[in-house]
Image (cartoon, rainbow, N blue to C red):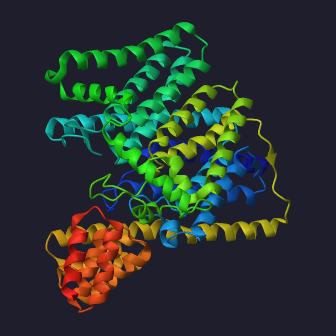
Amino acid sequence: MARSNWSVSVTLERAQLWLVRTGAFALPLVVLGSTNDPVILPKLLAARALIVLLAALLIIRWARAELEIRRTPLDLPILAYVASAGVSTMFAANANLAFFGAYGRMEGFLTIATYGALFWLTAQSLSSAVEARSVIKAFLAGAFAVSVIAVVQSVGTTLTSAPSGESAFGFGGVARAAGTFGNANALAAYLALALPLGVNEYLRAGTSSDRLLAANLIAVMTIALVLTFGRGGWVGAMVGVVVVMAIERRSLRRFAVAAGAAAGVVAVIALAGTLLGAGGPPILQSTSARLVSLVDPTAGTGATRLHIWNDTLELIASRPIAGYGPDNFGLVFPRFQTGPWAGSQIIDESHSELLQVAATQGLIGIAAFGWLCIAFLRMWWTGRQQILAGGVLGACAGYLITNLVNFSVVPAALPFWLLLGAATILLRPDAALTAPMPTRHRARILSSAVGLLALALMSVPALALPYVGDDRARQALSTFAAGDRGRATTLIAEARAVQPQQVLYAAVAGNLATAGGDWAAAREAYLRAAQLGSFDPSVFRQLAVADQHLGLEVEAVAAARRSVELGRFDPRNRALLDELTAARS
């Protein structure tokens, strides 16, 4: 019996470890073609599934009286950070947006809590520095796979067609690498997190085969990072790699080789771009131009960021303590926007994580974030002699520096928080363990059963319903495009029924009703989208049109005025308001 219990205990511990490894490898790779959002929502659902499984294993181990809670120096700062998001949610401009997040971003309180849970459960699932290092190796294997996909995607798109100029999808006629992340800047942040760890593996390699594998990993990740054309990721990765090299100086020869190779890559790109000029390959021209633009912060989208940051400071000053609530930036920013910084496009992020936290969570969020950074640095200093400690510091530095000119986004943030959980064990393998309070066997079994049942019930709204809702939304849009508006209307109604908090589903329902001339149904759907926190001016333009057809002139003018408030620099909004105002007078 004792041997059987020991075997079960070992199996449970191994299951925890393998789940964390699988998450480190697979979370960045998850995409789905069966959902309307193929990137953000699937990754978030995968993370929730991982959390549910890890929590279930912890409950089972507690029922067997085997669980010990590992205390880390980051527990309280992360709890404070999540709590600050909760406080901001209570005082948010729109509570629905603050709790669930805006569709396509999903950076609401629920996601911030998911980050905290992923960190804590990762830390509880690892029992030694050896296990933590194995998680980092799985993370790097995932980064290699992501990089290969991204390079193939970028080069393949370049050979067929790519947008000219600079955009989120292309630069100078070359497709920006996004891979399984759906966004080049998000991929750049992820690679800025991964590249310093890869360099650390190379500097620590003890055999020629290990050095060859590490060098191959670094080369592929570097190519993918270059093809993102994400300047913030380039700078973040360079700083992270310098941190690693400064700390891991165990082989001066290997250090010199790595530093020389990095300097050589930069020099070759710059020299080749200068010599070849307009006659060189598009990828080389674009890379050279992007590299040169690093010395000019106002080049390209840099000027746009500077304008957005300046306006964001006014936004922060208007509600400095608790902010406007997670993911409410797009709803509030138009009040403070002083120019057409993105043309007629919606600006829903500050493009700086520091400013974003200040705008959405206020000074309490900044204080909690600062506490977390200080606690991490103290923890790192204590464990700086541990293997891969330099890589951990370089990785975190690279990620955070990248986000100074970007913002947290689910595909890159999930691996970061999981890696942070592994880092606490890597740096503090001797962290204190606290055994659970002793309880009677029956009481422990009963409470464990209740906990498992609660997890199962939570899985329905956390996993099943979001998937079903987005699947129905995808089907509704594709069915409407095929010409079957009636079926599309039924499908979007099903999506709204299972996910009533989603702004997009209500807006799509309004568009389908508008296409069929059902103005009453269109008005209901658009009004609901507005209540849920829509900051899309087109929703209010369409609402104004529906009101006009229903003879609601006052309401139509109010809706048109709201579209102007949200999009003052889109001439369509002003034109509709002027038309409706003239019709009344």
Residue 526 x, y percent position in the rendering: 32, 79
Foreground of the two, 204 or 112: 112
Q: Quadrant of the C terminus?
A: bottom left
Residue at 61% x, 26% y: name it.
Answer: 390
Q: Is residue 25 visible?
A: yes
Foreground of the two, 80 or 542: 542
| Number of numbered callouts drawn | 0
**Quarter occupied by residue 323:** bottom right
Q: Residue furthest bottom?
A: 551
Q: Is residue 48 visible?
A: no
Residue at 36% x, 31% y: name it.
Answer: 296
In this rendering, position of residue 266 left or right of residue 74: left
Considering only vertical position in the picture, is 299 above or below 358? above
Considering only vertical position in the picture, is 423 above or below 27? above
Residue at 59% x, 59% y: name it.
Answer: 320
Residue 482 x, y percent position in the rendering: 14, 70
Foreground of the two, 409 or 402: 402
Q: Residue furthest front?
A: 585
